[in-house]
Structures are given as C-alpha cells and as structure tokens.
Amino acid sequence: MNSLLEMRSITKEFPGVKALDNVNLTVAEGEIHAICGENGAGKSTLMKVLSGVYPAGSYDGEIHYAGNLAQFSGISDSENLGIIIIHQELALVPLLSIAENIFLGNERASNGVINWRETFRRTEDLLKKVGLSEAPGTLIESLGVGKQQLVEIAKALSKDVRLLILDEPTAALSEGDSQALLDLLLELKTQGVTSIIISHKLNEVRRVADSVTVIRDGATVSTMNTKTDDITEDRIVRDMVGRDMASRYPDRTRVAGDMLMEVKDWNVWHPEQKDRQVIRNANFNVRAGEVVGIAGLMGSGRTELAMSIFGKSYGRNISGEVSMHGQVVNVSDVPNAIKSGLAYVTEDRKTLGLILEETIIKNTTLANLEEVSSRGVLDEGQETAVAEKYRDAMNIRTPSVFQKVMNLSGGNQQKVVLSKWLFAGPEVLILDEPTRGIDVGAKFEIYGIINELSAEGKGVVMISSEMPELLGMCDRVYVMNEGALVGELTAEEASQERIMSLIVTE
Amino acid sequence: MELADNNKEGGSQSLGAYLAGHLREYGLLVALIAIMAFFQIVTNGVLLKPVNITNLFLQNSYIIIMALGMLIVIVAGHIDLSVGSVMGFIGALAAVMIVNWGWPVWMTIPACLIMGAVIGAWHGYWVAYWKIPAFIVTLAGMLVFRGLSLWLLEGQSVGPFPRSFQALSTGFIPDFLGAGRPNATSLAAGIIAVMLILWMGLKQRAQNRQYGMDDEPTAFFVVRNAIICGALLYITYKLAYFRGLPNVLVSMVLLTIVYNFITSNTTLGRRIYALGGNEKASKLSGIRTERLTFLAFVNMGLLAALAGLIFAARLNTATPKAGFGTELDVIAAVFIGGASMSGGSGKIVGAVVGAFIMGVMNNGMSIMGIGIDYQQVIKGLVLLAAVFFDVYQKNKS
C-alpha cells in the first residue's frame, strides 16, 4: 500500500524541553492508524507539527504528504490539502446552528451573502453521511457531546478531508456513542478516508486500527501492523510505560502513622450537566506520614475529587463526609477546609494557584494573612521574612522575593505555590500534578519536599498522570477511572502494567 | 503622600533602570505639575490665585471622594456606573428631608449615608452573589436612581439648605491660633503635614533598606519630596491668605489617608488586590471573594452618598440634573491614575492625582474660556493617552 503521510525524524524543542525527539510516523493510504502514549508523551505536539500549528521551520525533520514535501505555515495550509484535525475540546460555537458551524469560515455565499438553501441542502447530505438525524438548523448547544463530535466530522467532510485526525475522540463519550463513532470511522475508511486516531482505550484501538504507533517521552517506541504483528493490549501497555526507573526519586523511610484523613461515600455531580455524576462513591484515606497516590487518566475525575473535597470548589449536590483524626470536619467552603487542616495545590498553577502580577511575598502569605498581621494591619517586614524563609527552604531561584511570580520558571512558580500552602500549616496536602511542566531538576527537588513533609508527619495525596512518579513516591496508590476509585494497590503490588490494566479494562 | 511604589524588583539598580521601572508613578506627578504650570502661564496666574485654589478643591472634592471608592471597585475587577445618579439621588433625598420634611441636619446626614450604603449593598448583592456583570447592574442602578431623584424632587429644584448643612462644603476651618490673614491654623496644618510626610518617607526608606527592598535613589527621594512639600507649603500659604482651609479639603485629605492605609497596609486591602488579580486563585486560597465584592460596592455607595451631600451643600440646592455624567469623570480619574481595567492594580494616591489632573484641566480650560465642546474632546484624549501609556509600558516590558 502507498503511504499517504510520512513524518521523518521530527524533532521539536521548546525552551528547556525536547518535546519530540526523532519521531517517525508512516500512515498508509486508506488505513486507520492509532497513536498511543501516556499523557505528555508528545502525541499532541506531533499532531500540531503535522497540522501546521507549529509552522515549517520551527521543527527539524521532514513531512511528506501524498508524495510531496509539505511545508505548512499554518492550519489553513494543511486543511487545503485535506488534513483535518478534530481536537479533544470541540471547536464548535454553541449558539450557532449545525449548518452554520459546519460552514463556519467556509460559508456557501456569493459576495458575502449567504446562500441558505445550498447551505442547508449540503448540511443535510453531510449529516446523512455521518448518520446524524438532526435538522440543520438545530443549535449546537442542544446536542450531546457524541452528536457534537459527529458534527465536527461532518465539518471535516465538508472540507474534502483526506486525512482525518481525531484526538481522543471517545474520551467524553458514552459507550453507545463511542461504538457509533468507531463504526463511522470504519465506514469512512471504505470511502477512502485515512484516519489517525489518538486514544487511550486499547480495546477501541484493537477494534478499528490497522496499525499502531506507540510514542513515549517524545520518541517513537514501536510501530505495529495488524497484518504482520500480533498486537495485544499487553504489548501496547508495555511499550507505553516501559522506561527505566533508576533512582529518579529520593529515598524516604516509610512509616505510616495514625489515621489522618478519611473520605467516605463521596459523590459529586457535574456543575452544569444535571444528570452527570462526576465522582461515584469514592472512599479513601491517608495516614500521618503517608504519601498516597491517585492514578488515572486526564478526565477520570481526579481533580474533581480533590477540588470537591477542598471546600466544595467543584461540582454540586456533593454528598459524603470527610473526617480528620476520626472527627467529621466541615469542608463546606475553602476557609473551613483550610481550618480543618487541608491544603490543595492545584494542577493549574497559573490560573488557579498564583496571582501572576504580584510578588513572591504577596503570593506566599495569601492563604494565611492572619499570621503576618495584627488586628487586620499587615506587618510587611514579617511578610518579607516569611517569604525569605521559604525561598531558602524551597530553594526558589530568584534575585529577590520582590520579584513578580510571572517572571519565574514553572518549577519555581510551583515552589511558590507550595510555600503558600506550607505557610498555611495544613495536616494533609493534596498535590494535583505537582510536577507537571517543570524540568527534571526541579522535579527532584519537589520530590524531596514531599518526602520532608511526610517525615514531619503530614499526609500527602498525590495526583499524577505520570505513573513512574507515583510508583517512585507513594506508599499506596488508588486507581481512578470514570469518577470511581476502581482499585487500591500497595507500593509492593503496584506496577505500571497493573495500574494501566485497571484503567483500560473498565 | 507617597507617590512612588515601594515594592518592585530588588537589588541595586542604576538611576535609569529605576526610573524605567517607576515611570508611571513619576510620570503622573510630572504630568500634574506640567499641566498646572501650563495653565498657570496661559491664564496669567489666575489658576493659582488663592480664591481659585479654594475653588479647585471645592469643585473637585466630590469627584475625588468617589474616586476613592471607585478605585477599590475597579481594583476588585468591577465598575460602578451608578455613582453619578446615586450622588444626585442622595442630594435630592437630603433636600427633601430637610426642606420638605423639616428634619434636622444631624439626623439627615447619617440617614443619607446609610441610604447610600444600602444602595451600594443592592448593587453589590447582584454582582457578588448572582454574578451579574457590574456593568449591567450599575447601568440599571444609574437609570433607577436617576428616575427616583426626578420623582423625589418632582422635577423641581429644592432648596435652600440651612447654614449648618452648607458648612459641609463651603465652610472653612476656624482660625484657632490667630485672627484673620494670614490664617495661622492653615499655615500650622501645612507645616505639620510637611513634617509628617518627611518623617514617614524617611521611616519607609529605613524599613525598605532593612528588608532589602529597592529603595529610591537618594536624588529621586529628595527631588520628589521637595516638589511635594514645596507645593503643599505654597498651597497652604495661598489658602491662608484667603479664608483658610476649606472643610472639604480636610475631609478629603483625611479620607485619602485612611483609604491609602486600608489599601496598602491591611489584610482587607491585600485581599481586594488579590481578588482583582486572580479571583479563582484567591477563592482557592480561602478568601471570601463574594463578601469582599459586596463590601466594595457598599463602600462605594457610602462614598457616593457623602459626595452627594457635599455637592448639594455647595450648590445650596438639589436639582434633578445633579451628578449627571459624573460617573464618567470619576472612572476617568481612576484610569488616568494608573488602575488597570482588568483589576488587581491601581493606587489610591494615583486615583486622587488622576482626579486632580482632570480637575485642573476643567478649571484651567474654563478660565481660558474654552468651550465645553473642546473641553470634552481634550479630556477624552487625555484619558486615552494615559491608558495608552500604561499599555505601551506593559507591552514593552
């Protein structure tokens, strides 16, 4: 079979990080090609290189498409050649109709006047092709996610798609919608559309894919073909996670003390979609001095679990109880959660963790201003001293604590967020992706800080998408999938394969 | 008054680097001086005549007082379009209470201030707890209270006020220390103020040194304080040769000091800046953001009421047109003073200086006989220029 697309030794660097290192990807004409890899392995970066989001010249390597060397300077270049990418977050305008969305930017019009007849007629054809029986005038917001996904595909078809790229298309879909979508992909294949599908769900991959490429740490690990290779889920999992685990984690003596925090029968519903339950009956606990991990994919409900516990900062109709030292505590809002001894270090430090335009000092003391004030009047000298103390303890690299946090690197920003919460004096810290987007050196320092916290008898809950990190740091790991804690593994039992298989076999 | 920011990047820097980092603050002061100098020259010295200086304060006091509240609302990330209407409504209410109902002044003033706070609470409730954009809520308030003033006054002007009420605005501090001209009390107050400014400035400097904050180069400190203190002495000297210190000037200065303290030295102030800087992060840090937003509007209503009383007292009558369009002057003053549209930054002193810049321009252009048409155009362009300067500075860094 001819290859439609060949990406040859693609290397893409960001300041300080090599996101892609010599990646090769060959997609044959008319096949469905799956790309698998952990979060952060480089899949999305690779697709952005392919679609021209990162223009030619900003990466090394060559892209050959339909026999020619492709040098895209933007998305419109790749779209003109029939490469259409559908992102995980759908790019539809909720208050416009299906027809308007499908032809957005590509309107059926002459001299700027829209030809509604043709627009509606062509929309009907396209909807028929993707098997969606809705009127073209229906507003997007009245459709479920699954149908919206189909509208995206119809939109791609309207642009004469040749290579369709789907980034985790079934992540937000129900079982039935997922099946329908996969059937549609197989149907499109018979019509000559080539697809690349990025997915974590290996059963789906096995069902539709003709070939599978596994990417890990920004490099191609393996490419398998259903005709020549025996593709098993085990093999894919092994390729996805198999990397050496040599001492990237500082040692810690593991002593689990008394029961510190217990969460019982925790249920949370989605804040907007009334009938969608986000957390189902979660039960977990942390002992003093223990580091407990929560594994799971993005979107499995880990952040929602943490934020709903921390002062009900997420969701509605929350039920269940949180106890500290055996006593049920009030976590109805953030001030009470802090008073109860909780701290939550967010995964999204720029929008939820820091005030970027303010100084390190003001960010450090924000959650505990009482400590540096008397009768409501701040003692700036004391504040400065506190910030200096944490700068030394955390090794925050900055010329001065008067520096605005927006000028710090990701790792140093994360240390400022940690400083803020340590200064608030919690007993249990929930760390949500504490090492996301920071370099290896800073990661090691953060692991060291976590170990010190546990040595002081604090309880740490660590949410992470990086399984080696969980295995290297945690005493116990809970596995989360679709809003439920589906397994609990001790440090001895836990392995990447076991965690991954708990996740992928629902 | 401390004009210069005292918490920027640390370390020893060259004069140029320091100036670049603080250009906005010095720029504001320089702009005010330049504008005053310009009008002093083109009006042949009328601008700084004692009677005109007194007028400047009387004419702008209500704008400055409302700018204090507006700064807090804007720092918290909102806006209040209703203040002009609320000011007019409270003036009308005071007139009706005193003139029509025969209430005594001592009862009317607190009643009106409470009414102002209640109006602020009304706006704050919708903004804070129902998350309705402040623009909409206060636009509605603007219409509602404009209508209510008309209704209260039945379309007529109501007045005059008793002398004790007028004293709110047009009264002067009696001369305890001497008699007649020059007014010894004014002179003494001016000298004490200068000494306080110098003492506090030096104390701050010593503290900055101790904690390693970047302190202002000595030359800057000296020049800045020489200008501020010189101006202050000059103005008190002039005022002393007219009728002394106007009551409004005293209340204005006291309020400015109090609000400056609240915004820069208290946990309350810090939390408001945090809320405006990043509401979600503040909420997740245990700050009760709804309550703070609510309080910012209550405070705004209170100050708008005070401004309404002062304005009515100055005109000695309440008219249905009072406060018409004033909200725009107040908002412009805050933005000229360097506050950011997106919230989280801005200073009380900046807002006051911004209000003075507007006030001096109004006054100077009126003396020159420039028509109201050109005045509006010029004020509009000055506002745009000031904000452009901010944005340009930000993009450059």
Image (cartoon, rainbow, N blue to C red):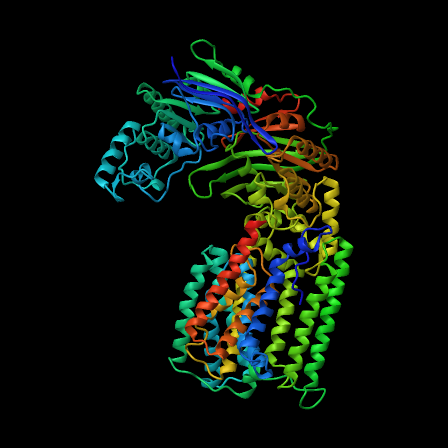
Specify whether residue B355 is in view: yes
Residue nearest the observer in this picture, A336 or A264: A336
Q: Position of residue A364 (x, y in %)?
A: 67, 48
* Residue B113 in view here: no
Q: x, y percentage for residue A14?
A: 57, 32
Is residue A60 depicted above or below A420 in this figure? above
Q: Is residue B371 above or below residue A61?
A: below
- The answer to whether A147 appears left or right of B227 in the picture is left
Decide: is A335 above or below A19: below
Left or right, A326 with respect to B205, comes to left
The quadrant in which the N terminus of chain A is found is top left
B377 to the left or right of B342? left
Eyeballing the image, is A409 above or below B328?
Answer: above
Residue at the image position 39 percent from the left and 82 percent from the top: B156
Percent coordinates x, y for residue B370 in the rendering:
45, 76
Number of marks present in the image shown: 0
